[in-house]
Image (spheres, rainbow, N blue to C red):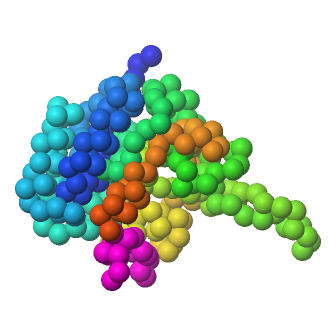
Amino acid sequence: MNKIPIDVTLVSGARTGLLQKTLESFSERLFRHFTLETLFVNIDPFEGGRAEVEECERICKNFFPEVVAHKPETPHFTKAVKWLWQQPYAEWSFHLEDDWVLARDVTYEDFANALKRRVTQISLMTKEKNWGYRSPYHYEPSRFKVLGHDLGKGLNKKRPIFTTSPSFVKREFAHECASLMRDELDPEKQLNVLNPPLNQYTARYRNHFIGKRREYVAADIGREHREEVGLKKTVVEGNSVWTEKGE
């Protein structure tokens, strides 16, 4: 099989231990199955200072031969995603954050089997998606109603759902989403609500899962980490804010 080469985009804080664990997992269970081009990484000074930022860049270079690092002075999650999604040259990239691990191998065949019509994102199934439907596409859950009668739960196929969790993203889709994102809104939330021009654009496309319903291909290790260091994540006016517990 002739493999499509992919770029990788990575949102990282200055969290060396988490980043090392994440890259070890994805290198062993996903990246080795693909032909990799460039890693584009945004390293924010989040949970660490300049020394940790530089160490994170060194860790990345241990896993990728070609690394382009963006190291802002202040952390900003949405700006990180926007910058990263504007970078890829390859037709497809794999988007990742520094706090995930894989529960099983993700092969090139998994990726190739999801390359269907209008698919611009191929995302790994996770517990957080709470997906109990048979559809391999991520749509907004809804209720079926006929003449005022509730016929049960279903899916709103006019409202596909997209994500910043681990996923393959098509280059043109990523570039256009980045150009339409607003800095003051959480990137994932505005992909699906809150940003009408962006939502009108994404509604044309589909997000295909890798993994069956309730099969958790990737696991979020960031929640446990936040508990350990005493951080909490809240959404304030459409954006994600991290604060110390007790504040």
Q: Quadrant of residue 171?
A: top left
Residue located 22% across and 67% down the image? 75
Queried whether the magenta region covers residue 37, the answer comes back as no
Residue 165 placement, left or right of 43: right
Residue 130: where, in percent of width, then height?
61, 54
Residue 53 placement, left or right of 26: left
Q: Report the number of discs.
A: 0
Question: Observer-nearest residue: 74 or 207?
Answer: 74
User: Which quadrant holds the C terminus?
Assistant: bottom left
Residue located 63% across and 45% down the image? 214
Residue 55 placement, left or right of 227: left
Residue located 24% across and 57% down the image? 13
Residue 184: where, in percent of width, then height?
35, 76
Residue 190: where, in percent of width, then height?
46, 68
Q: Main secondary structure of the magenta part?
A: strand
Question: Observer-nearest residue: 18 or 72?
Answer: 18
User: Which residues lie in the magenta part?
Assistant: 231-247
Question: Observer-nearest residue: 104 or 247?
Answer: 247
Queried whether the magenta region covers residue 246, the answer comes back as yes
User: Which quadrant holds the N terminus?
Assistant: top left
Residue located 64% across and 60% down the image? 140
Residue 130 placement, left or right of 194: right
Q: Is residue 180 visible?
A: no
Q: Quadrant of residue 66?
A: top left
Q: Residue furthest left?
A: 51
Residue 143: where, in percent of width, then height?
78, 65
